[in-house]
Amino acid sequence: MRVLLVFGTTHGHTQKVAGFVVDRLGRQGHHVVVANAGDGRPFPDARTFDAILVAASVHLGRYQAAVIRFVREHRAAISARANAFISVSLSAAGHDPDDAAGLQKCVADFMRATDWAPQLIQHVAGAFRYTAYHFLTRYVMKYMAYRKGAPTDTRHDYELTDWDDLARFVDRFVSTATVARA
């Protein structure tokens, strides 16, 4: 299966998530093309793929504008194929009902902005990338972490991603896409 994975990242963790997905798909024998929506290069032609994954991270309640632009421009092709959306956020790591409601709102806003209803949606916990943040962001993120009981030592980064859960999602996506192609 030819798979297109388009991602947007702000501090780099969504790129790591995309790399994990690419590796998992590649080990299963699928050919994957990866595109960073924010690098300014032209997007691959989505019509030439069997399945499409879109991954983006939430920052200040929004996903990357470049990802929104990709989905808007290629919505018909995406919708005509097996497809999924991977939403990366720190809120996905917790069990706070307000965080869960906030994530649902972010996804709903994304779907409204793109006019796309993904076949599958996976919430993936992000990372505290303290060493990648500039001073003000590091301060704000440390405060947020403190309030949620998360790690606050800004000399280190902390991944909250459940890699096993992401692997199960990729396998489920492949299974769904394979059935759709049959």
Image: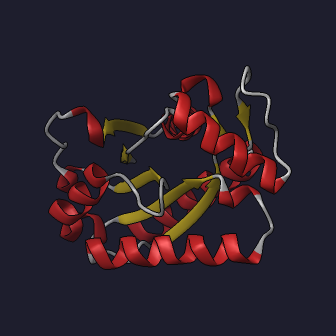
Question: Left of 41 or right of it: where is 12?
Answer: right
Which quadrant holds residue 147?
bottom right
Question: Left of 45 or right of it: where is 182?
Answer: right
Q: Quadrant of the C terminus?
A: bottom left
User: Residue at horizontal 13%, vertical 38%?
Assistant: 42
x then y, percent, for residue 137: 54, 38
x then y, percent, for residue 28: 57, 39
Relative to 110, is 67 above or below? above
User: Residue at horizontal 70%, vertical 40%?
Assistant: 142
Q: Is 109 or 136 nearer to us in this picture? A: 136
User: Residue at horizontal 21%, vertical 53%?
Assistant: 46
Question: Left of 50 or right of it: where is 10?
Answer: right
Look at the image and name its color scheme: secondary structure
User: Residue at horizontal 28%, vertical 54%?
Assistant: 65
Number of numbered labels in the structure image: 0
x then y, percent, for residue 70: 23, 55
